[in-house]
Image (spheres, helix red, strand yellow):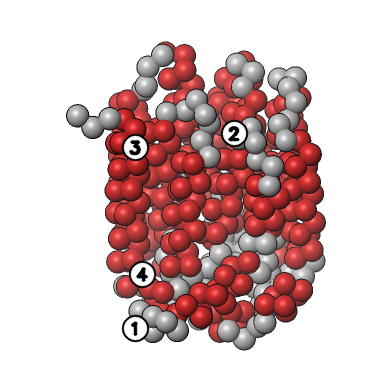
């Protein structure tokens, strides 16, 4: 009989292999969009690393340079495998961070949490629609998801001395709008530990990393131009309302998780729940910024919602297990099945995004 310790890595590996195979198959049949080819030609092949670091990416709503720096390394690797089609090779720069996001979610789990539960949560993360779709986009979205997952996962680590500055810096170098993400996360952590009257573990490293991340994000924000993506006119709040409607249950779940964690004086889970609440709450402002400045193509600026949704769900399941002294097997498998089916129905859901892009014309659509 297979033990639980053996089963967990097998389940995780099988889920991620199926996801990777599905993504590669999608990449073969998906041409590079105008924004992808623009970024490759302008900011990867026609910019120096020094210029990217000092001035940011050119012609991008988010000039944060990390994705394009990674792209420069990938471009050299591409010379070693010239037969691999561009549509597949460049999508690997998105597929790899998506897989790393899943691994980070699994690896950075609470010490008391069942490994199998987080292995299944990692599979749910990659099969959720945003992660599944953007894993085949040669753009910074998947990298954004990876760092967002890392900084939430680090909330559960008692010793994360050097990881905080690296995670915050990586997020800031990926998307300048992450300035608001990091500010919200810092406020959530301080509030959570104040509410349960505990000291923040590794407080010095956490605050140092947060300060570095905010400074880097602010630096590149000052170098962002004003861009419009020329898409359909969704009105002032119609686009945000349409997208947020599908997240009403995660919002309710995060509020419930915050209450339960506060009642149990569980600071890490309370921090994660407050992060989810604040990330959802700041979204109207981010949407307003999008409509007036054109920094991002809606709804890509909500990619980090995928992280909070998975953490909220798994947090509630962990609470049920802790208080009922048994693992809630059937809700977990129902959740996994629902998320996987949502991911597998990608081709039907993708039609709406394809129509939006076709209506946007031939000009590049910027992050």
Q: Residues within 10 Å of mark 3 (few under 14, many from 20)?
A: some
- Is residue 142 among what the camera can see? yes
- Of residue 235 and residue 361, the one placed in the foreground of this image is 361
User: Mark 1 against mark 4, which lies toward the viewer?
Assistant: 1
Q: Earlier in the sequence, mark 4 or mark 2?
A: 4
Taking the view exactly as shown, the residue that stands out farthest to the top is 324
Q: Are marks 1 and 3 in contact (CB under 8 Å)?
A: no
Q: Are marks 4 and 3 in contact (CB under 8 Å)?
A: no
Q: Residues within 10 Å of mark 2 (few under 14, many from 20)?
A: some
User: Mark 4 against mark 2, which lies toward the viewer?
Assistant: 2
Q: CA distance from mark 1 to mark 4?
A: 15 Å
Name above or below for residue 233 compared with residue 277: below
> Which residue lies under the disc numbered 2?
156
Residue 314 place in picture, x, y as percent: 46, 32
Mark drawn on residue 83: 1
User: Mark 4 against mark 3, which lies toward the viewer?
Assistant: 3
Name which residue lies at 72% across and 72% down. Answer: 53
Q: Secondary structure at mark 1?
A: loop
Name which residue lies at 41% across and 50% down. Answer: 126
Q: Secondary structure at mark 4?
A: helix
Name above or below for residue 337 compared with residue 33: above
> Which residue lies under the disc numbered 4?
27
């Amino acid at each position: 009989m297979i033990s639980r310790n053996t089963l967990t890595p097998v389940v995780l590996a099988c889920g991620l292999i199926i996801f990777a195979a599905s993504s590669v198959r999608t990449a073969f049949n998906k041409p590079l969009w105008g924004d992808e080819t623009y970024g490759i030609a302008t900011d990867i092949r026609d910019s120096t690393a020094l210029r990217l670091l000092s001035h940011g990416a050119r012609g991008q709503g988010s000039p944060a340079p990390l994705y394009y720096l990674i792209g420069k390394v990938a471009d050299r690797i591409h010379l070693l495998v010239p037969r691999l089609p561009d549509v597949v090779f460049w999508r690997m720069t998105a597929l790899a961070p998506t897989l790393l996001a899943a691994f980070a979610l699994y690896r950075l789990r609470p010490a008391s949490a069942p490994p199998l539960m987080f292995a299944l949560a990692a599979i749910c993360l990659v099969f959720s629609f945003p992660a599944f779709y953007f894993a085949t986009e040669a753009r910074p979205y998947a990298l954004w998801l990876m760092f967002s997952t890392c900084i939430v996962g680090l909330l559960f680590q008692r010793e994360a001395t050097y990881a905080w500055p690296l995670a915050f810096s990586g997020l800031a170098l990926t998307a300048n709008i992450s300035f608001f993400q990091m500010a919200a996360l810092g406020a959530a952590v301080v509030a959570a530990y104040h509410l349960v009257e505990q000291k923040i573990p590794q407080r010095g490293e956490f605050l140092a990393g947060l300060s570095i991340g905010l400074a880097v994000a602010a630096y590149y924000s000052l170098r962002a131009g004003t861009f419009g993506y020329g898409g359909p006119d969704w009105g002032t709040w119609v686009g945000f309302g349409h997208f947020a409607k599908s997240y009403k249950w995660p919002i309710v779940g995060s509020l419930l998780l915050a209450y339960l964690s506060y009642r149990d004086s569980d600071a890490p889970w309370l921090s994660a729940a407050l992060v989810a609440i604040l990330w959802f709450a700041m979204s109207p402002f981010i949407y307003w910024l999008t409509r007036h400045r054109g920094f991002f193509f809606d709804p890509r600026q909500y990619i980090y919602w995928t992280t909070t949704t998975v953490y909220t769900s798994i947090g509630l399941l962990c609470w049920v297990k802790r208080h009922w002294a048994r693992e809630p097997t059937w809700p977990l498998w129902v959740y996994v099945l629902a998320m996987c089916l949502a991911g597998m129905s990608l081709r039907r859901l993708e039609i709406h995004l394809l129509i939006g892009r076709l209506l946007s014309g031939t000009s590049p659509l910027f992050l």
